[in-house]
């Protein structure tokens, strides 16, 4: 019965997707020719490749030069693929992976920055709507789904993988590189949520899964943008399986031969190529006591004060590193991010996504601050790494400023409309 309802919904929404084809191209120009042009369609399909297996399908993020940053057209194509695969009775389970040295570095914020500067705010809103609806689809997916996080996984890249049933991380070495804003040197999968450092907020479901990490680890990751490696992702529950990089081809070959939709069979196959691992002595996960002591405070100001006291008492360099990262971030973003995660702790995924959509719309619309565009400009466009935040100090951020990001959007601005009644009728 539930599958039949989904079929009805998809048939009703399909024409709407076709009518929104203008959104899939930022530079669509009308031209006259006796022959149809398929160049743009081919380009979109090349950004997300598809591999067909015996009883499964795999989506491959294919923008390796951009660390598989998610574009509006990629989000739309992923959504269409996963909807069709869910309806196809010949497909037992689905997979997602990235091409190159990253799974995904998150949303293509430079494209969003350019759209905002061109006055194309509606296209930005459509991107967030499409992306968040896809995250919700993954979080309520009817079939087993596997994400192979072999490389950098940041921001929305985590959003399109962590809602899945199985999340596989590896020991892959990520060489020193810069994505224009952040420099990495890590021997493993690198996971982070650096949105506050670019004047945004942890989105695409981040307030849901960060708030459910042990203790106050989620607040720590959101406010500092600190990184976790694959072993740490296993230890704190963000990932379900750990595999050596060299075993990935065998693991994928094994999955490709499965003729099943049984999650236990898939789980056992993943476990065959898995490894039992523990965080090393330098891992931040050994600092849970200090994390909870400092990041359990009610406000960002109190968190900073707690870190300063801890630094003075323990002389732990970790405290100073955390302080420096927080002080580099947008003051307004810090307060918005903290409130969002605190609310997310008591809300299901759909409510978290609706709230995150409101916050994102406020950022791109510049209703309160220009920090998002300023952060992207400073770290990714001009690369002067000297953002001019507004407000510039935490004490200048008022309660009304923060609350503005969370109130309903109003009659003239539609809210994010998720198919909760259909996909989660018991909610």
Image (cartoon, helix red, strand yellow):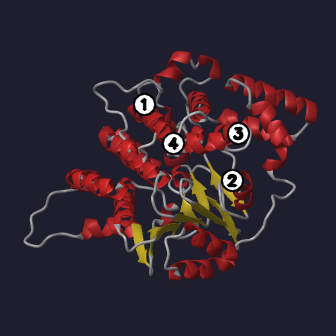
Query: Callout 2 environment at 10 Å: few (<14), some (14 to 19), or many (20+)?
Result: some
Kindly check if marks 1 and 4 are in contact, taking CB atoms under 8 A apart as contact. no
* Earlier-in-chain disc, 1 versus 4: 4
Which disc is residue 362 wearing? Answer: 1
Q: Which mark is residue 220?
A: 3
Residue at image mark 4: 349
The residue that mark 2 highlights is 237
Closer mark to the observer between disc 2 and disc 1 = 2
- Rounded to the nearest whole Å, what is the CA distance between mark 3 and mark 1? 24 Å
Q: Residue at x 80, y 27 (%)?
A: 306
Q: Nearer the viewer, mark 3 or mark 4?
A: 4
Badge 3 marks a residue whose secondary structure is: helix
Closer to the camera: disc 1 or disc 4? 4
Left or right of 31 in this view: 319: right
Residue, x 78% and y 24% (percent of image)?
Answer: 305
Q: Badge 4: few (under 14), some or many (20 or more) residues near its Cα, within 10 Å?
A: many
Are the residues at dot 2 and dot 1 in contact (C-beta closer than 8 Å)?
A: no
Q: Position of residue 283 (x, y in %)?
A: 81, 53
Mark 3 or mark 2: whose residue is earlier in sequence: 3
């Amino acid at each position: 019965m539930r599958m039949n309802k989904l079929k009805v919904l998809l048939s009703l929404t399909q024409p709407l997707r076709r009518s929104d084809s203008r959104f899939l191209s930022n530079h669509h120009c009308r031209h006259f020719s006796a022959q149809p042009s398929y160049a743009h369609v081919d380009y979109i399909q090349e950004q997300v490749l598809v591999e067909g297996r015996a009883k499964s399908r795999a989506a491959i993020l294919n923008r390796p030069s951009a660390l598989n940053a998610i574009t509006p057209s990629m989000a739309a194509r992923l959504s269409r693929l996963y909807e069709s695969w869910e309806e196809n009775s010949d497909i037992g389970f689905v997979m997602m992976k990235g091409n190159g040295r990253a799974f995904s570095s998150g949303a293509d914020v430079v494209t969003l920055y350019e759209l905002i500067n061109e006055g194309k705010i509606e296209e930005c809103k459509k991107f967030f709507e499409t992306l968040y609806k896809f995250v919700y689809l993954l979080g309520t997916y009817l079939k087993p789904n596997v994400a192979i996080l072999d490389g950098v996984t940041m921001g929305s890249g985590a959003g399109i993988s962590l809602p899945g049933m199985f999340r596989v991380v590896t020991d892959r070495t990520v060489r020193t590189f810069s994505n224009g804003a952040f420099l990495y040197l890590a021997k493993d999968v690198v996971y982070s949520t650096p949105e506050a450092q670019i004047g945004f907020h942890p989105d695409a479901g981040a307030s849901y899964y960060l708030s459910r990490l042990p203790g106050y680890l989620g607040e720590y990751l959101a406010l500092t943008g600190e990184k976790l490696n694959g072993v740490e992702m296993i230890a704190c529950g963000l990932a379900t399986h750990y595999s050596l990089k060299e075993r990935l081809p065998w693991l994928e070959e094994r999955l490709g031969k499965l003729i099943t939709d049984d999650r236990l069979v898939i789980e056992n196959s993943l476990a065959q190529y898995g490894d039992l691992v523990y965080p090393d002595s330098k891992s931040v996960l050994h600092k849970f006591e200090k994390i909870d002591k400092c990041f359990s405070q009610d406000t960002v100001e109190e968190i900073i004060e707690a870190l300063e006291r801890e630094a003075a008492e323990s002389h732990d360099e970790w405290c100073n590193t955390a302080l420096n990262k927080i002080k580099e971030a947008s003051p307004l973003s810090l307060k918005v991010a903290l409130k969002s995660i605190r609310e997310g702790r008591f809300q299901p995924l759909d409510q978290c996504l609706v709230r995150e959509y409101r916050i994102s719309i406020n950022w791109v619309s510049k209703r309160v601050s220009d920090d998002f565009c300023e952060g992207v400009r400073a770290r990714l466009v001009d690369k002067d790494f000297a953002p001019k935040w507004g407000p510039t100090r935490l004490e200048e951020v008022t309660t009304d400023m923060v609350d503005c990001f969370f109130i309903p959007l109003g009659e003239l601005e539609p809210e994010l409309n998720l198919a909760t009644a259909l996909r989660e009728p018991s909610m």
